[in-house]
Image: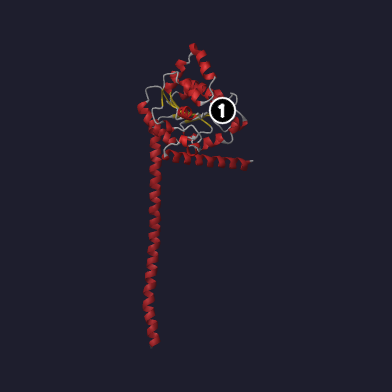
Amino acid sequence: MQKNAMIQSYYHFFIPMFYYYRFCRRFSRLFNRLFLVFILLILLNYLWANLSHETHQRKISPKIFCFVLTENKNHLTLSRSVVYTWGKQCDRFYFITRLLNTSTELMMLPKFENTTDVTERMINRITFDVLLHLRDEIFASSYHWFLRASDTSFVIMPNLRRLLSQLEEQENHRPYIHIGDAEKVFDQHQLPSIGSVMLFNRHALNEMHSYFSNDRNDDKEHCVGNMIYDHEFIKCLKRVQIQMNSQDENLILSQPLPNYRMDRRLKVSNVRLFFSQLSFFFRLGHLLQSEYNRCSSV
């Protein structure tokens, strides 16, 4: 009797416990699923908000015509990394380079397909010819802003569009060029740059064309023929009455990004340096990936 009473007491104790366990397990499964759905909805809402913001920003931002000068030897490496990172975010994008077998995947400006190899010493001279050519091209007539870069440049396009939104309010009705810190770095530290990012509006192209017209060909040859570095290009542009750098000059950095960390003379704000470091490693990752893909396909 005592044994049966003990078994019956265990029965009355464990059966309800087992029932509550199954009930809690079912409830926990439902709760876990609802929790995962809730987290997923939050992520989707965050992605949709960012996408909508970027799309809206692109709609209200002025259209950007980008051209990148690249050497023949960089067609399969640096040029492709530009295409797969920031280049595709431009409203229109072209390379300035010679037409070769290695450049078949690159969108090139037709007039300059038969140019000689675009070496570092020629970048700024060719830039001058490209800007004057784009001024008269029909397919570029709807663009008000033109961005010049080299195949070693990296542009954070959302930041550039925010800058353009500000410049549209201030510099929309007069010639303007944003040259970044290229001139300041050379004047203060004698560190020249070649092919750094520069931003021109259409009024600047018109002023350049008017100043270096046929009656001033000698002046043009003397100015353009002798320039190699960016500060010499800027010095040449200063002959024309064009506003430069109304915004912070450190928004466009002319030197290699690691230099701003290693060289105390080039120290900029921590926020800008943080984004510069991110963009540097982001670009490095894409370069390594493009090299891996190229080697795998061989």
* Quarter containing the N terminus: bottom left
Question: What colouring does the structure picture have?
Answer: secondary structure
| Point 40% across, 38% down: residue | 54
Farthest residue to the left: give it: 169
Residue that protrudes farthest toward the bottom in the picture:
1
The residue sitting at 39% across, 64% down in the picture is: 26
The local crowd at label 1, few if under 14, some if 14 to 19, many if 20 or more residues have their Cα within 10 Å, is: some
Q: Secondary structure at mark 1?
A: helix
Pick whichever, 259 or 154, lies toward us. Answer: 259
Residue 125 at x, y = what percent? 53, 22
Q: Say if 288 sits above or below 241 in the image.
A: below
In the depicted structure, whether residue 61 falls above or below residue 270: above
Residue drawn at x 39%, y 44% is 48
Residue 115 versus residue 139: which sits nearer the camera? 115
According to the image, label 1 marks what residue? 120
How many callouts does the rendering have? Answer: 1
Q: Position of residue 223 (x, y in %)?
A: 51, 18
Residue that appears at 53% across and 22% down = 227
Q: Give residue 287's quadrant in the image.
A: top right
Mark 1 is on which residue type? Glu
Q: Position of residue 254 (x, y in %)?
A: 48, 31
- Quarter-wise, where is residue 102 in the image? top right
